[in-house]
Amino acid sequence: MKKVFVNGYGSIGSRIVSFLKDDPEITVVGIGKYSPDSKVDDAISKGLNVYVPESKLDSFSNYKISGSIESALDQSDLVIDAAPGGHGYKNKKNLYEPKKIPAIYQGGESTTGAAAVSELLFNSRVNYNQALGKYHVMQGSCNVTGMGRVLEPLRNKFGDQLVRFDVTLVRRWADIEQTEKKVSDTIEMTEKPHHGDDVKLYFGKDAPLYVRAIKVPTRQMHLHIMDIRFKDTAPKPSEIHDVFTNEFGVATLWTAKGTKDVRDYAQNMGFNFTDTNMIHIHANMTTAIGDTIQMMYSDDQTGIVIPENHMLMQAMLFEKSYKDAFTHTESIFHMAEKKQKLQEYFAKNN
Ligand SMILES: NC(=O)c1ccc[n+]([C@@H]2O[C@H](COP(=O)([O-])OP(=O)(O)OC[C@H]3O[C@@H](n4cnc5c(N)ncnc54)[C@H](OP(=O)(O)O)[C@@H]3O)[C@@H](O)[C@H]2O)c1
């Protein structure tokens, strides 16, 4: 049994810890909170031990906390950092490295430059083995993870027939739980988005991948608009869809009118946190024109990285084979079942 601490209890941290509690191979030491607010009691009511920074112990005197984050780390075999972007690096320098504790970081951190948390950006579909026994690894962000789920199977299938990928990321404004965050009535353009460079860390630095990004006023997932150019005539849309028939974390849907349809279905079916944990190819939008395939898929922003964190944790803590880690993750997340249900509900109308 290994002991894991989750530092941060926001959109990502609260999901990760909820699934870890279902993992018989893991003891959850607790979670790290930084603000004395209602989420402290919320976590305690779920049976979690709450730890806070040593320097902030006084401001949590009205709550039944279990001690300092520093002391929790001393009891842990690994920490999953779920801090706001940039704070993970500071935690690495101030806490994890001095205490020699292995750490997983989230996609708001960086793998290049002065504030890099790791040289490795994890995507279980592409580089699982490289994370075996590693000490500091960053999980790709939701958009970066989603792109990998599409690009890698296409590369495996079509190889040097592929000439170029052009992707427009249509990013959601805020998460469903972030009720305090106002969704502005604008379409915001993102200068120099990091996502393409992040994908190239695992897909290859010379990959012909060109990414643009905009942010739109919705809480209901990201949508990626992807054009794939082939050397010769592009395959038929059905050949593209066939590539994803047995892919983990990719559902192929025909009748969803928008991303909220998918979220509503997840909610109605009682999926945890209303997450599907996957990407959804909107198959009715796939077209072949000459040498180009045009496709769109939506990306469950908060859910998609949670099973990935679970795979990464197993590589770092237990050095399991991909197959063993995958089987264990599947026993907790039930992705195959969710995929089947989604595909049946949004099946093609005959
Ligand atoms: N949201 C998504 O869809 C999504 C998807 C993929 C990846 N990510 C990445 O995941 C990371 C976390 O994002 P999030 O959306 O979960 O953020 P969030 O909802 O804003 O939650 C951040 C949490 O971190 C805590 N925190 C504050 N300072 C901290 C520190 N110094 N060290 C550790 N924790 C600290 C906060 O505690 P208090 O509330 O107590 O202040 C809060 O619980 C980011 O790197 C983000 O880019 C997010």
Image (cartoon, grey):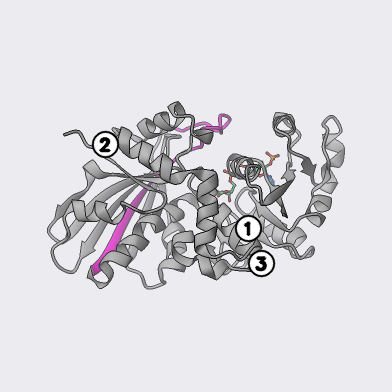
Badge nearest the viewer, 2 or 3 = 2
Q: Earlier in the sequence, mark 1 or mark 3?
A: 1
Q: Quadrant of the C terminus?
A: top left
Reply yes or no: does residue 34 show up in magenta: no
| Viewer-proximal residue among 45 and 163 | 45
Q: What separation in Å lies between label 1 and label 3 (alpha carbons)?
A: 8 Å
Q: Position of residue 100 (x, y in %)?
A: 76, 65
Residue labelled with disc 2: 347
Q: What separation in Å lies between label 2 and label 3 (alpha carbons)?
A: 43 Å
Q: Is residue 166 left or right of residue 119?
A: left
Q: Which residues are magenta?
A: 162-184
Residue labelled with disc 1: 104
Q: Is residue 245 left or right of residue 218?
A: left
**Where, by quadrant of the figure, is residue 105 drawn?**
bottom right
Determine the residue positioned at 63% across, 68% down. 134
Q: Residues within 10 Å of mark 2 (few under 14, many from 20)?
A: some
Question: In terms of secondary structure, where does tag 2 sit?
Answer: loop
Q: Is residue 210 above or below residue 302?
A: below
Q: Is residue 148 above or below residue 251?
A: below
| Viewer-proximal residue among 122 and 29 | 29
Determine the residue positioned at 74% across, 65% down. 97
